[in-house]
Amino acid sequence: MVKGVYISVMPKMIKKEYRDRAIELIAADPNLDLQSIANICGVSISTIKNWGKDSAFGNSVYERYMATTGIPMAQVNAAMFREAKLGNVQAARYCADIKGMMIKRVSVQIDSPYDMFLKAKKVDIAAEAEWEEVKDLPPRDPINDKPKTRSKEENKKIKAIMSITPEQRAKNRKKSLASYRRIKRAKKVGLEPLGRKTGEAKRNWYAELEKKEKEMGII
């Protein structure tokens, strides 16, 4: 008898499914530890590490992350624009930066024109452009009379907008995993995704899903 080494090779289709699942998990929560990812995907930690060494895997995670953060980022921008309209200087700088109006500093001693405008709070030279007439200005905020207090409040608001609490992160992760599993279940029985169904339509969809799963002997 010839002695040999038996090597277990994971089928390509199953491997791709686990790999795609890992991409979804990491994109939903980049802080998720490797052991949790491995447990959910049903693979070993070494497999996750090997995937992480692949540049294509990293690019897929990044692309998926950018796709899933589109709506939250739009909400952040909307909140920052609202704060800027109320006179929040830090929010105004953020809005100007994402709009490409802010020129980056090239040295410590040189400020961009827009930076100097914010510091001087006056315009010395009128630009030759068509300006939209502003009819209704927001009422003056009395907190402007206390610059230090205002600065503290602005920083608090910006931190609240830009940060996510551990509880919210856990809630988002749980929601993402539930959605992922629901999509997989529907795909396996040939049922259309739940989408945005609510109320009676949602309950009927789950009833149909369970019915098809029973018919196929899945549950």
Image: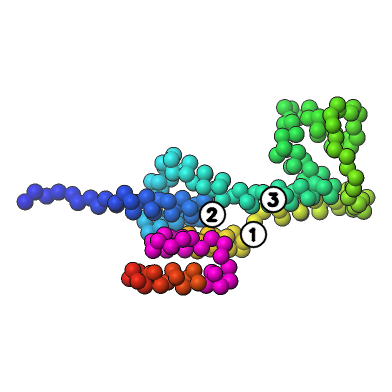
Could you tell me residue 148's position as x and y percent?
86, 49
Q: Which residue is depicted at the point 64% across and 52% down? A: 72
* Residue identifier under label 2: 29
As drawn, the label of residue 175 is none
Question: If you read the primary sequence from the N terminus, does the residue marked by circle 1 or circle 3 appear first?
Answer: 3
Amino acid type indicated by mark 3: Val
- Say how the picture is coloured: rainbow
User: Is 47 left or right of 1, judged from the image as shown?
Assistant: right
Question: If you read the primary sequence from the N terminus, does the residue marked by circle 3 or circle 2 appear first?
Answer: 2
* Residue identifier under label 1: 165
Could you tell me residue 139's position as x and y percent?
91, 52
SS at mark 1 in the image: loop
Q: Which residue is depicted at the point 56% across and 65% down? A: 197
SS at mark 3 in the image: helix
Amino acid type indicated by mark 2: Asp
Q: CA distance from mark 1 to mark 3?
A: 15 Å
* Residue identifier under label 3: 76
Crowdedness near tag 3: few (<14), some (14–19) or many (≥20) residues, C-alpha within 10 Å? some
Tell me whether the residue at label 1 lies in contact with that at label 3, contact meaning CB atoms closer than 8 angstroms.
Answer: no
Specify start and end residues of the magenta stretch as a single range.
181-203
The label nearer to you, 1 versus 3, is 3
203 vs 128: above or below: below
